[in-house]
Amino acid sequence: MAEYHRVSVYGEENPMKEPASLRYRVVDVFTTEPLEGNPLAVFPDASGIEEGIQQRIARELNLSETVFVRPATRSGAAVSLRIFTPATEVKFAGHPTVGTAFVLIDEGVVPRGSERFILEELVGPVPIQVEHGERPLIWLTTPPITFGAAHDPVQCARLIGLDTKDLLDIKPEVVSAANPGIFIAVRDRAAVDRAKVDTSVLAAVNAREPEPVLVFVFAATPEGAYSRMFAPDHGVPEDPATGSATGPLAAFMIKHGLASGSDGTRFISEQGVKIGRRSLLHVRIRGDKGSEGIDVGGYVTPLIDATMRL
């Protein structure tokens, strides 16, 4: 009979040891409805989970991201977050930030009624603001946004399986807030829904970039934007809601006259509809053309409280 080995959260194999019980929660982010928005797993106390095991857990749960909460190392931060997709760790992500902020408030790690606090991520400190009401609307301040290379519209049309006439007369461009994405503006919602990434063309696009890019397709709407995001190189074929790309989306739209850049402007990016996970990402512009910051916010709906045994 073969000897049984159990994988330890510390990364060692322990023959016949009692399993560790790891509590986690699943919440749906950027929605007020269960089973919509973007699902997120949060391990509220991950101080004993080895990094290699964190990646394996994220792959096992197979959500867009899984968050492991650890004690802060920066002064002034409430906690630190490690964020993993099924394939890799990321420096910053929006729906994990908003969802984890909700869990911290809900569990009293951050005092209920708090209006501001800071989360530590690999990108650095991320400020959080909470609008309290019947349910909290949680805002993050997007890290510094940078513009990169413009890309050929003909190649980008092929990248998303559309004709060049489906694209607006705006050159697709790489914009980043820690996670670079190529932003492609199309004419209407129907064109967004028809988009499908050609991975061979994506490989050619990535050959021009220092790291793999997200593919963000959107159409301007009266409410703001109707969006989809694809990240096959990150293990995410399509993301229901991408908070880290929504600040760059706002910056791209302001730059090209697709949205007002006035101080106090708010709009909504609607994402995830095509895959049955409708998400509403709120955007708030501060200062002229976002000079004082671009905030991304949303509601969170708790769904699961569970235990993983390793």
Image (cartoon, helix red, strand yellow):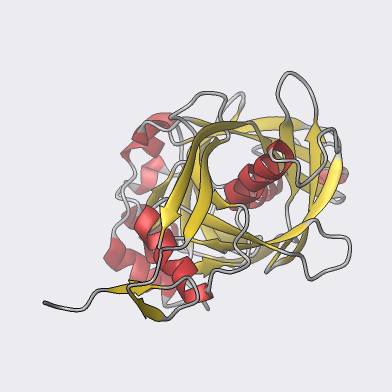
Give the residue at x 46% y 49%.
307
Q: Is residue 261 visible?
A: no
Residue 176 in the figure: left or right of residue 262: left
Seen in the picture, residue 91 relative to 44 is either above or below; the reply is below
Q: In front here: 264 or 60?
A: 60
Q: In front here: 36 or 159?
A: 36
State the count of labels: 0
Q: Quadrant of the N terminus?
A: bottom left
Residue 99 percent coordinates (x, y): 62, 43
Residue 46 percent coordinates (x, y): 59, 62
Residue 132 in the figure: left or right of residue 181: right
Residue 229 in the figure: left or right of residue 133: left
Q: Can residue 214 be seen in this view?
A: yes
Give the residue at x 73% y 29%.
136
Q: Residue most toward the left?
A: 1
Give the residue at x 50% y 76%.
10
Q: Quadrant of residue 16?
A: bottom left
Q: In front here: 229 or 140?
A: 140
Q: In front here: 300 or 260?
A: 300
Give the residue at x 52% y 49%.
24
Q: In which quarter of the image is the C terminus?
A: bottom left
Residue 48 in the figure: left or right of residue 257: left
Residue 260 percent coordinates (x, y): 74, 35
Q: Residue most toward the top?
A: 134
